[in-house]
Image (cartoon, grey):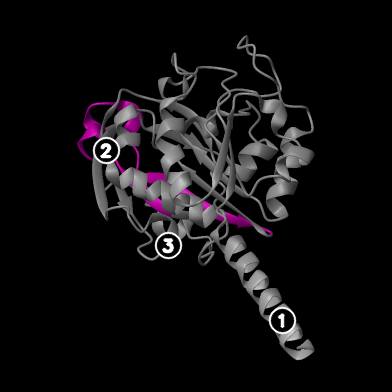
């Protein structure tokens, strides 16, 4: 009887152990989406009457598919060490100096916010930036701000929207498996400077094509549009696309969003060896 009882306890303990392990395996990433605009606010992150934005509505079912959770905020004050430790991934679709009010009545980031964000990434956090995330913490100084140094480049300007081609230059990276080898679509294409050529792993270039003859500012060699890097234990990925609502609605973009989230949350190989000089053209085609 005692032997049978002891065996029952062992079986129960093992079952609970495996149930707990399975439960842990089923949990997806905890994500914080920040869409504060201290400057211009893009329509895709503007809240409508429902109190949500287009970006939030696109991301939410993807996060649920990953069995994760997502908190959405325009309060940049939440970028602090205590809050960040609750999350696996932080997404920025932001603009301007987030430590300043900007007249948007949203919470501002503390002066130590960028330092705490970078420390969190180095400790194993995943950072994912979209479009105007490179129009955040800009500076007239020739040296990049700590934030720009982290994300990899700084927005300078953009021209009129046009159909550009996003050309994949890393065919094996897990964060862009669903990205077509060459995808032509209309969007607002940012121009950048202060590229971190030392640490950047370029994933895709913007092929400008015939637009060079139409807009002088684009009469330059093709340049990075999606890139990533490792930072100590953490991962960083930036995607310059996503000004337009229909870009977010595209099936290929949605699949790529899922892959972005998986990669920055630590899934799959890092594969982030610097490759800027090897894949970015130095002259016009």
User: Of 140 and 126, which appears nearest the observer?
Assistant: 126
Q: Horizontal placement of 90 versus 166: left or right?
A: right
Mark 3 sits on what residue? 173
Distance, label 1 to label 3, CA atoms, is 44 Å
Q: Horizontal placement of 138 versus 166: left or right?
A: right
Distance, label 2 to label 3, CA atoms, is 22 Å
Residue range corresponding to the magenta coloring: 203-232
- Number of the front mark, 1 or 3: 1
Distance, label 1 to label 2, CA atoms, is 62 Å
Disc nearer the start of the sequence (1/2):
1
117 to 6, vertically: above or below:
above
- Quarter occupied by residue 150: top right
- Where is residue 168 shown, x and y percent of the image? 33, 55
- Where is residue 86 shown, x and y percent of the image? 70, 44
User: Who's the residue at 40% across and 58% down the image?
Assistant: 279
Say the numbered circle drawn on residue 164: 2
């Amino acid at each position: 009887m005692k032997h049978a009882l002891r065996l029952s306890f062992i079986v129960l303990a093992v079952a609970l152990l495996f149930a707990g392990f399975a439960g842990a395996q089923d949990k997806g990433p905890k994500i914080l989406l920040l869409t504060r605009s201290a400057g211009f606010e893009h329509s895709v992150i503007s809240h409508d009457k429902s109190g949500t934005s287009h970006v939030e509505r696109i991301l939410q079912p993807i996060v649920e598919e990953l069995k994760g959770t997502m908190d959405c905020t325009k309060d940049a004050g939440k970028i602090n060490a205590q809050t960040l430790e609750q999350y696996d991934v932080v997404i920025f679709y932001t603009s301007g100096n987030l430590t300043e009010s900007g007249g948007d009545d949203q919470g501002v980031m503390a002066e130590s916010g960028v330092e705490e964000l970078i420390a969190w990434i180095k400790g194993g956090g995943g950072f994912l930036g979209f479009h105007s995330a490179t129009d955040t913490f800009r500076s007239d100084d020739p040296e990049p701000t700590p934030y720009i140094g982290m994300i990899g480049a700084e927005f300078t300007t953009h021209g009129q929207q046009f159909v550009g081609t996003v050309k994949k230059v890393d065919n094996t990276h897990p964060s862009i498996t669903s990205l077509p080898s060459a995808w032509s679509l209309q969007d607002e294409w940012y121009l950048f400077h202060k590229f971190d050529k030392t640490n950047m792993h370029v994933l895709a270039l913007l092929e400008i094509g015939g637009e060079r003859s139409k807009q002088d500012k684009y009469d330059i060699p093709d340049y990075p549009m999606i890139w990533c890097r490792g930072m100590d234990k953490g991962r960083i990925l930036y995607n310059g696309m996503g000004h337009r609502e229909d870009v977010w609605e595209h099936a290929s973009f949605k699949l790529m969003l899922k892959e972005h989230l998986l990669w920055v949350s630590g899934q799959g190989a890092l594969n982030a060896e610097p490759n800027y000089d090897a894949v970015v053209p130095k002259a016009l085609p």
